[in-house]
């Protein structure tokens, strides 16, 4: 049996502090195995001996496992990553040879914000991450599943990626900066991508996340000879201990409070009402103080309804007035003095003060109260005899306004006015009733909504199948969403962009197999999510114009380039898409083929060391290699090389959405990756995109590969030319790549892109302002 592979993995992304020698800030690290409490986890993991005995190691083998962080650990992780540009993932891993699996994944729904994957099928390490809301993958070719021990450090500082293997630098790249501000709901998975996919087979030990630069130095101390400095070590340790103690106390209090609340929810308590010092039981009724409303206590809330009053038809010599102790107005005789009409209770100042009573003006002898203001500030109120000071609160003395109206002070009087959403009853603004805006068509509810009348206002409810956009609008809701840039136009109905179909735009239209596209005969059609491209066939290469139809594919002259395998006296003859070896005569015309520093005889057949599924042969100086022919009727067929012959149920794979079942050997596309099912394992790798020679490119929504665009404002990636400047609205010259806010529009941001001013509006900013 081949030995298992022991993999020691680090993932580093640097911060403001450094790892000096063996010093490490304990506040910037997380022990994953301890946080996940693997000691108490039995399903799918087993504690075993590790690379060393200084820490626990666990064997991941069962397919039915869910090893992920608890909610409080996820919150801690989100807080640790916030505003960090550098972090480190550390693990000691023993991976089963020729298997693929995810060592660690930090993801939210379908988005991988950090994922480290080891593929033994394609012999590469993959780093999956997010950049500007879009998924990115860096594939680093290297065989880890080779039965050997390895120390691997994948370091990333901003956009600088560095790969160490066994403390030796292997790769160094510049990539798009990853997003490290994790959204709420992000979770950490160990040894798998999610519940069903990316299951790692092997042993994991020393799993840690360290948020500081050069974290690999702890694994490879000889890479840093600097003496350790840790002046703040003790204070940081004490701070962590204090926080842990506080967290424990708060957790205990919260658990106690939740227990008490759950007990209260099971109790039945009668809710009473207290009004003006009086206590009313549930369902008690009474007449309120102004005798105009009937009130009831309902579950602790007071509900009152105004008593209805019959319309008054007063005679010409009387007017409707309020009488103390009565709810409804009554007709009382009016008074007339000097052409002025007075209602019952109103006064007029002549030589003396007179009040209208029973249709007769009666002299009032009571004295006016003294005023505490200058004479110029004296004001005589309407229908009164005594002056008051300017600014007098007439509402404090009356009139008596109902619950749906409010008193408003004027210069010489007070009146009742209906509140918004109410209208006066029979022309009397002291008593107002609700306006039904829905029935009166006085609402602003848009399409896909239903107007619901409420007391004093209204509400726009979404019709079934729609969700709220704002207070007045609703939009269609598609339960499974519209994938690849599709638009939800009605409940569970999507309009798909070009290249996609299906009820949720989940199906990619294969322009190649459906015969929609015809590529030049020097190329072959390769389907991509949303579109396609014509790829040059073997023996041809693109001439640099990158024609969409493949017309730019021209023959490779293997003879001129000396990439042929013709040997000795054989003459190389270039052919379209290949070459031939001709040997007229002579003892050296053996037809043998040079290969791998040695010689293969004419007619010899062999298998490549690095590919057990290959069959190569030497014929007349030329080497031909192909895949092993599969005979599914042969009981000893190699299922690794012939997965299509594998009919075992355990070798089938579920797709990433958990809806579709694939057989071993099947291929499909998901999230801009080519995926394959092999013996029950799903392995995915980035799609190969065509090379583009244009100046500006953009990845359209729902697509995976860039397309050429002529407008720099639409470009995703652009090489800025500082010679191409822009003028902003102030007339200031801006260098290409500079960003500014538009004058007079704080929610509009502009950027100079090679002489073009490109502006965009922040809708959230507009909403907040």
Image (cartoon, grey):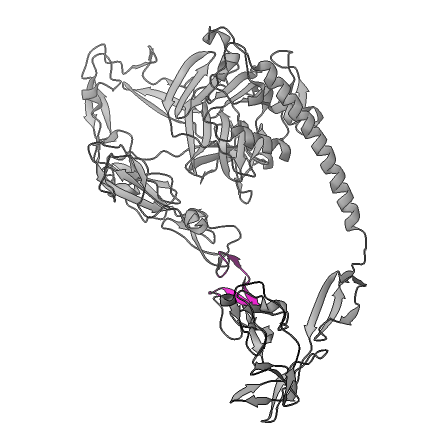
Front residue of 439/217: it is 439
The residue depicted at 48 percent of the width and 12 percent of the height is: 166
Q: At x 55% / y 31%, what residue is drawn?
A: 79
Residue 260 location (% of width, % of height): 78, 43
Q: Is 99 or 169 nearer to us in this picture? A: 169
Q: Residue furthest bottom?
A: 316
The answer to whether 98 appears left or right of 302 in the picture is: left
Residue 667 percent location from the top left of the image: 46, 37
Above or below, 400 relative to 547: below
* Residue 628 x, y percent position in the rendering: 43, 27
**In which image quadrant can residue 33 be found?**
top right
Q: Quadrant of the N terminus?
A: top right
Q: Is residue 136 above or below residue 298?
A: above
Span shown in magenta: 445-472
Place of residue 168 in the rendered image (x, y in percent of width and height, measured from the top left): 43, 11
Q: Is residue 570 visible?
A: yes
Q: Quadrant of residue 38?
A: top right
Frontmost residue, 691 versus 452: 452
Is residue 485 in view from this perspective? no
Is residue 734 shown in magenta?
A: no
Question: How many numbered marks, from 0 up?
Answer: 0
Question: As drawn, is 72 to the left or to the right of 556?
Answer: right
Vertical position of residue 9 compared to residue 520: above or below: above
């Amino acid at each position: 049996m081949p030995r298992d592979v022991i993999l020691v993995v680090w993932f580093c992304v640097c911060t403001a502090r450094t790892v000096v020698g063996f010093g490490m800030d304990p506040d910037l690290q997380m022990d994953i195995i301890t946080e996940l409490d693997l000691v108490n986890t039995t399903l799918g993991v087993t504690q075993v001996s590790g690379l060393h005995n200084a820490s626990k190691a666990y064997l991941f083998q069962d397919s039915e496992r869910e090893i992920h962080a608890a909610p409080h650990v996820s919150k801690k992780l989100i807080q640790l990553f916030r505003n960090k540009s550098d972090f480190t993932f550390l693990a000691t891993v023993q991976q089963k040879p020729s298997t693929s699996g995810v060592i660690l994944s930090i993801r939210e729904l379908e988005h991988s914000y950090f994922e480290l994957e080891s593929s033994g099928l394609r012999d590469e390490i993959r780093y999956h991450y997010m950049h500007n809301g879009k998924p990115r993958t860096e594939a680093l070719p290297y065989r880890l599943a080779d039965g050997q021990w390895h120390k691997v450090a994948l370091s990333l500082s901003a956009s600088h990626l560095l790969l160490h293997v066994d403390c030796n630098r292997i790769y160094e790249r510049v990539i798009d900066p990853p997003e490290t501000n994790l959204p709420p709901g992000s979770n950490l998975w160990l040894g798998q991508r999610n519940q069903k996919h990316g299951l790692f087979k092997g042993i994991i030990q020393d799993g840690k996340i360290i948020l500081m630069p050069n974290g690999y130095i702890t694994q490879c101390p000889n890479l840093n000879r600097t003496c350790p400095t840790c002046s703040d070590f003790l204070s940081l340790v004490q701070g962590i201990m204090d926080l842990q103690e506080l967290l424990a106390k708060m957790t205990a209090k919260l658990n106690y409070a939740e227990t008490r609340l759950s007990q209260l929810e099971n109790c039945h308590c009668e809710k009473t009402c207290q009004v003006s010092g009086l206590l009313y039981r549930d369902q008690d009724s009474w007449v309120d103080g102004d005798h105009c409303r009937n009130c009831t206590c309902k579950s602790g809330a007071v509900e009152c309804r105004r008593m209805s009053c019959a319309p008054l038809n007063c005679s010409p010599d009387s007017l409707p007035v309020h009488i103390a102790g009565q709810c409804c107005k009554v007709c009382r005789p009016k008074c007339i003095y000097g052409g002025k009409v007075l209602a019952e209770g109103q006064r007029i100042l002549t030589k003396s003060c007179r009040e209208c009573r029973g249709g007769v003006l009666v002299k009032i002898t009571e004295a006016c109260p003294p005023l505490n203001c200058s004479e110029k500030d004296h004001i005589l109120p309407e229908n009164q005899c005594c002056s008051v000071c300017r600014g007098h609160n007439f509402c404090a003395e009356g009139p008596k306004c109902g619950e749906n109206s409010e008193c408003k002070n004027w210069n010489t009087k007070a009146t009742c006015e209906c509140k918004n959403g109410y209208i006066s009853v029979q022309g009397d603004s002291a008593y107002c009733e609700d306006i039904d805006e829905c029935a009166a068509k006085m609402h602003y509810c848009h399409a896909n909504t239903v107007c619901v009348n409420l007391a004093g206002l209204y509400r726009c409810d979404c019709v079934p199948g729609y969700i709220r956009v704002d207070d007045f609008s609703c939009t269609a809701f598609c339960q499974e969403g519209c994938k690849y840039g599709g638009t939800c136009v009605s409940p569970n109905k999507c309009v798909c962009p070009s290249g996609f179909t299906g009820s949720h735009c989940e199906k990619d239209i294969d322009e190649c197999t459906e015969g929609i596209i015809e590529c030049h005969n020097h190329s072959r059609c390769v389907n991509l999510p949303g579109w396609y491209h014509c790829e040059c066939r073997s023996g041809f290469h693109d001439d640099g114009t990158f024609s969409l139809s493949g017309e730019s594919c021209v023959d490779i002259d293997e003879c001129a380039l000396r990439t042929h395998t013709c040997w000795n006296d054989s003459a190389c003859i270039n052919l379209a898409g290949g070459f031939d070896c001709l040997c007229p005569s002579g003892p050296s015309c053996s037809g043998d083929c040079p290969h791998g520093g040695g010689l293969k005889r004419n007619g010899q057949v062999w298998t490549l060391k690095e590919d057990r599924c290959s069959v190569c042969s030497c014929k007349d100086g030329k080497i031909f290699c192909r895949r092993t022919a599969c005979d599914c009727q042969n009981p000893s067929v190699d299922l690794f090389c012939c997965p299509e012959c594998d009919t075992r149920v355990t070798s089938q794979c579920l797709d990433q959405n958990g809806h579709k079942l694939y057989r071993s050997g099947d291929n499909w596309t998901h999230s801009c990756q080519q995926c394959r099912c092999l013996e029950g394992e799903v392995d995915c790798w980035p799609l190969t995109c065509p090379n583009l020679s244009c100046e500006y490119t953009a990845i359209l929504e729902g697509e995976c590969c860039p397309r050429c665009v002529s407008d720099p404002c639409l470009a995703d990636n652009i090489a800025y030319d500082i010679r191409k400047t822009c003028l902003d609205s102030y007339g200031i010259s801006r260098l290409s790549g500079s960003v500014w806010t538009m004058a007079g529009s704080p929610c509009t941001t502009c950027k100079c892109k090679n002489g073009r001013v490109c502006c965009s509006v922040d809708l959230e900013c507009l909403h907040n302002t």
